[in-house]
Image (cartoon, rainbow, N blue to C red):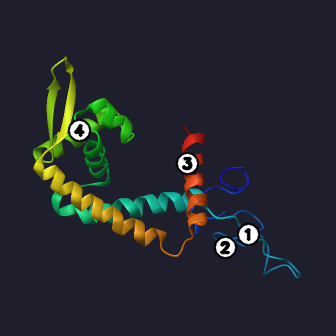
Amino acid sequence: MVDGQSRAQPAVGPDQGSRAAGTNGVPGRNDDAGTRPGAVRTARPPRLFFLTLTAERRLRRWIAGRGGERGISASAGGVLLHLASRPGASTGEVAAAVQASPAGLSGLLARMETSGLITRTPDPADARTIRLDLTPGGREALGVVQESLHELNARINDGFSAEELATVARWLRHVSEALD
């Protein structure tokens, strides 16, 4: 089983179900309910993979929309938050914190430096290591990121109990650890 789905059910979107025999050719329909007398339509488990990817894309768009005028993407926001609590972090430390490869992070850091959000300086003890710090513009942008995250958390947590949110958090940690 993958995220509560049987192997016979692919992890696809809600309108991309099987068109195999016995489904009446109706996307997302995996039974004969409605055509066989006495047939009972079975409940399908939630499409957690699809829902997680959709939520991740919408979260990134929402964050980018809040930081768009300053060029602050979700990834850039992660860099700012990490450097706020760990000034002088190396590029490798930041890459690990935002789960990016050092090579993948290089372009983002260059854009952030050009935008005046961070500085990159060689480590005096090891010139191969680059240290990162927030600039005054980066600290200002950090405030925007923190305000946006506060608003975002209020919006996505609204209507859920602390117990429900703890279950969601536990499931997300489980997914991360199971696939690491």
Of the residues shown, which amino acid type is indicated by label 2? Val
Residue carrying label 2: 26
What amino acid type is highlighted by mark number 3?
Arg
Q: Considering only order in the chain, which callout, 4 or 1, is on the residue closer to the N terminus? A: 1
The residue pinned by badge 3 equals 173
Residue 160 percent coordinates (x, y): 55, 71
Residue, far right: 38
Distance from disc 2 to disc 1, alpha carbons, whole Å, reads 6 Å
Vertical arrangement, residue 108 with respect to residue 91, above or below? below
Q: Pointer 1: what residue?
A: 23
Residue ID at (66%, 73%): 26
Secondary structure, mark 1, is loop
> Could you give the CA–CA distance between mark 4 and mark 3, rounded to whole angstroms?
27 Å
Determine crowd level at label 4: few under 14, some 14-19, many 20+ residues with C-alpha closer than 10 A.
Answer: few
Q: Earlier in the sequence, mark 3 or mark 1?
A: 1
- Pick whichever, 102 or 34, lies toward us: 102
Query: Residue 87: which numbered mark, if any?
Result: 4
